[in-house]
Image (cartoon, helix red, strand yellow):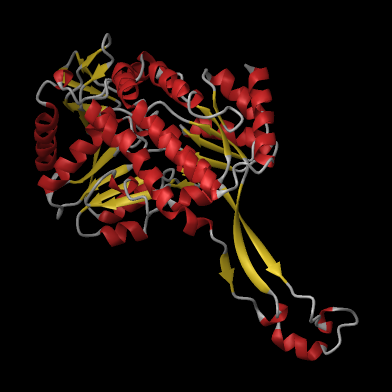
Amino acid sequence: MKEYISTTRSKQRAYFRSGATLPLCFRRQMLRKLSDAMHQYEKPLTEALWTDLHKSYEEAYLTELSIVYGEIRNHLRHLSGWAKPERKSSPIAIMPATSKVVKQPLGNTLIIAPWNYPVQLLLNPLVGAISAGCTAMLKPSPYVPNVSKVLSDMIRNTFPEEYIAIVEGNREVNQMLLAERWDLIFFTGSPSLGKMVMEAAAKTLTPVVLELGGKSPCIIDKDANLAVAAKRVAWGKALNAGQTCIAPDYLMLHEDIKDQFLQLLVKEWEHLLTKDSKQAKHFVRIVNDKALNRLISYLPSPSPNSPIASSPNGRLYYGGHYDRAERYLSPTILTDVSPEAPVMQEEIFGPIFPVMTFKQIEEVTTFVMGRERPLALYYFGNQGDYVLRHTISGGACINDVIMHIVNHNMPFGGVGNSGMGSYHGKESFMTFSHRRSVVTTPTLVDMPFRYMPYQLFRLIKRLV
């Protein structure tokens, strides 16, 4: 595998240097080729998503395939405009020169994808790489082996490996890939793995885009529309069984509406998934036993002195049912949770909602800013401007969850511990491009003032 990776990277470097990827007509052709391949492999991809994650066709299409299809269409529609040089004004000090910014592909890129949205999070960055004129080495997640196998077949049957290649394997393969020199590394995954990627990239000063995660707060104020909030929050946490990097991670509820909101949240979950979510067609399973065991460790157990389940993670308000054989965990609510509880220390990445309460909105902003910066922040109520002004997150929604990722006209990315760099739409094109400043100076006129011994210095000093 190591030899294959090194050889293929060398082939891709030679292919890029040949200039084959530069023409816009070539890039459009390759984008259409990717779209055609996805349509051809749509059934195998959705079947593999069901096998690996119990992800229904409807959810697979909406959260994976449709997003990539839309990204391709957007790039085909706007590629000419994005790639066009940008004319810039020239200051008097360099007149009569003209100035412009040209966009050049960065070159040979590496894209490493996670398991939770294995199709979207591998192919969406690839759209940006193709659009910008780069080559790409793709690495899908080993935790969804059936999806990875279909993706590998699709890529190998669609593109020559000197242009776009794909390799499967575990973290040892990641280490082999990171040992090579790339012109950009695009990584989606956990903050802990993101640090490893950045450390490896630092050895060769390779630029990185890190799409990570974090504990995204979901704040429900006392003046929120509770019925709408409960419906949207229930959907956002049920989506992919909470295994979404921008899933609402924990709830911060105004103490005046806590009980009412939790009752509505349970009602909405049971409407979306029925009272027995294990039988629900559209409820995804936990990816593997290790992840399920981690989530189960957050669940309280009844003590000898109390029939109510409790633990350092709080009390079990709702749910807490699981089946190891099926890797199933029901939507769960934990109340009376301490900020120091284990469930509040790391991204949950599952259908568990720890609940905290507040009296004043200042308590919320202080708490959020006292922790690592999240990938997303969600607020329901009438003080959204205040919350946005006093917090920092990768993205945010007011009176909604998740939906900021849908707008390809906005950048998607993290900040601080939740990531660096952004993509989607034009941002993807720019992420895989270098913006090169170019000044063109005519030779018919050659101003003498810039040369030693700096004649007319007093005059020039006033101009510059």
Q: Is residue 375 at all visible to an observer of this figure?
A: no
Q: Residue 386: image x %, image y %?
A: 30, 61
List the single residue furthest toward the top: 325
Residue shown at 61%/43% (left/top)?
207
Q: Residue 362: image x %, image y %?
A: 30, 56
List the single residue furthest toward the right: 453
Residue 248 vs residue 421, the one in the foreground: 421
Name the image quarter holding the N terminus. Answer: top right
Residue shown at 28%/32% (left/top)?
61
Residue shown at 57%/50% (left/top)?
433
Residue shown at 54%/47% (left/top)?
132
Q: Residue 348: image x %, image y %?
A: 34, 30
Q: Residue 23: image x %, image y %?
A: 58, 48
Residue 346 vs residue 117, the one in the foreground: 117
Q: Is residue 176 at all visible to an observer of this figure?
A: yes
Count of marks overlaid on the render: 0
Place residue 451 in its image quadrant: bottom right
Q: On the rendered structure, is 129 left or right of 246?
A: right
Q: On the rendered structure, is 253 left or right of 441?
A: left
Name the image quarter holding the C terminus. Answer: bottom right
Residue 35 vs residue 194, the one in the foreground: 35
Please tell me whether residue 100 is drawn above or below residue 45 in the rendered image.
below
Q: On the rendered structure, is 237 left or right of 415?
A: left
